[in-house]
Image (spheres, rainbow, N blue to C red):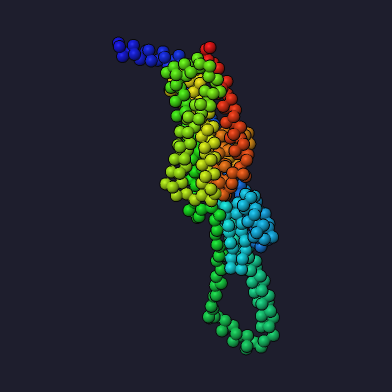
Amino acid sequence: MRILAIANRVIKELIRDKRTLALMFVAPIIIILLLSVLFSANSTTNVKIGTVAVSKTIRSNLDNTKHVAVKIYDSKKQAKKALKDEKIDSIIQKKSSGYSITYANTDSTKTTAVKMAFKNAVTEDTMTTMKNQMGTMKTQLQTTASALTKVEQLLPAKTRAKLASQASTPKTTTKVTKVAKTKVTNHYVYGDSSTGFFDKILPILMGFFVFFFVFLISGMALLKERTSGTLDRLLATPVKRSEIVFGYMISYGILAIVQTIVIVMATIWLLGIDIVGNVFNLVIINLILALVALAFGILVSTFARSEFQMIQFIPLIVIPQVFFSGIIPLDSMADRVKDISYIIPIKYSGDASTAIMMHGAHLSTLGLDIGVLGGILIVLTFLNIVGLKRYRKV
């Protein structure tokens, strides 16, 4: 009976807790529907290839390949500039000894797509050439046979009989002409041939872990301040709400800075990844993201009554960051779904980190990403100041 009494009490408490019920029943359905929308979208990869001194046939074969666009450049210098500006994904240059292909290699799926498209284009060109040669040989053989027939008719009967007897047991030698294999030299702007999909999403994963742990720790810490009564006593003093928010952000911000540096450095050194740009710039971008996560955690904690309720916000706040950060390629999503990513902080930090790690971008060229993150930080800080008003009783 006591077991049933305890079970009955817990069930009643769960029924009264609307957030727990929503987490158990509504959140999984929403996440499943979201995944369905994401993965049912077009999953093809579009690539842009720049060509230099490539034959018209090869260009035509490449251009006829689905999801491949070809751009013609007069020189390798022009093509390299386009590759650096991310206008194309690779460069195919025809040389006397074969082909030289340069890949941006920031996305292994695009690198693979270019290799397959080029291989198919060359194979199709070889088959067309062989077909044309066989047609020419057939015409020549028919012409030769016709001429021989006419000459044979002019010969005496005895001579024709002798030729016929010699032709009855001919010794034939078949010469097979081998098709020369196309020589291809591959070059990679970032990484090498072993660079995979994990290298592409690593800058995003780095930002995600910075965001997640700073968000969780800051939210939990401020929640503890409020539930223990420390925040209420502080609000009872003449201290301004803005001073309280900035004080908390500075204190937890120092912890977030240390945590961010540890995560970034550990990721770089333990995994041994290649970084084209400056590591300091990478740290700065993730520090800005950490401050955004800090402000987010403080804001969410004002709506939670316990640590368990704080965790309940994770499916609402953190999981969308994963879906729309770029881990799932955004260019494969429908436009209406892709638009959601523009309000996701990790999307901007991921773009900036990718640009630094793979393209060597400087902070001065990342004004849009830094500006959006800074704007989100200002808005969240303002909402935190306004949110504390509900707890001020005097």
Q: Is residue 288 visible?
A: yes
Q: Is residue 30 visible?
A: no
Residues 30 and 338: in front is: 338
Side (left or right) of 244 relative to 48 = left
Classify residue 225 by image quadrant: top left
Residues 78 and 116: in front is: 78
Place of residue 256 in the rendered image (x, y in percent of width and height, measured from the top left): 47, 34
Residues 176 and 346: in front is: 346
The residue positioned 63% from the left and 85% from the top of the image is 160
Place of residue 343 in the rendered image (x, y in percent of width and height, measured from the top left): 59, 32
The residue positioned farthest toward the front in the image shown? 238
From what the image shows, is residue 61 above or below residue 262?
Answer: below
Residues 340 and 345: in front is: 345
The residue positioned 50% from the left and 30% from the top of the image is 250
From what the image shows, is residue 70 above or below residue 28?
Answer: below
From what the image shows, is residue 167 above or below residue 264?
Answer: below
